[in-house]
Amino acid sequence: MSAKYTGFPALMYSGLYILKELGILEKDYSDTEIKILVLITDAPPAFLICIDKGDFSIKIENEIMNLVDIKEAKNLYDYYLAIPSDLLLEGADKIFQGISQNTVKINDNKVLIYLGAIASVF
């Protein structure tokens, strides 16, 4: 584990670490390269989750503070999620409700599959 992250990046790191230790990243993502940019809108900056052939890394993106910054950095990620912390903590139903009410922003539904896999360990 790593103590270099706090808050939501630490939570995602912990989930990915568990998936790696259990061999799930290697099994399910051995031929996959994915970059997911996550912005907790009330707790910026954004962070980038990179899953690369069964391994992972997280990088804090200090220059990405809002949705405009996300769209300007589109060469940085494959998928993005911009979400308020309360909706993320309330679970899937609230996330889907936020998408339908336009308070949660995504560029592709696949981001929910990948983040759901990470959240499945909790």
Image (spheres, rainbow, N blue to C red):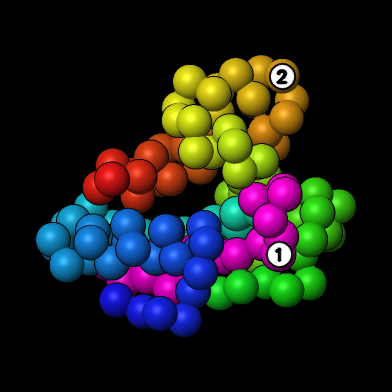
Residue at 76% from the left image edge and 64% from the top image edge: 64
67 lies above or below 27:
above
Which numbered circle lies on residue 68?
Answer: none
Name the foreground residue: 115 vs 41.
41
Query: Can the viewer see residue 101?
Result: yes
Residue at 72% from the left image edge and 19% from the top image edge: 101
Which numbered circle lies on residue 101?
Answer: 2
Residue matched to label 1: 45
Is residue 64 part of the magenta span, yes or no? Answer: no
Question: Magenta region: which residues?
Answer: 40-58
Q: 67 left or right of 87?
A: right
Quarter of the picture holding the C terminus: top left
Distance of label 1 from label 2 (alpha carbons)? 23 Å
Q: Amino acid at mark 1?
A: Pro
For label 1, the SS is: loop
Give the quadrant of residue 96: top right
Q: Position of residue 114 (x, y in %)?
A: 41, 45
91 lies above or below 14:
above
Query: Can the viewer see residue 106?
Result: no
Which sits earlier in the primary sequence, circle 1 or circle 2? 1
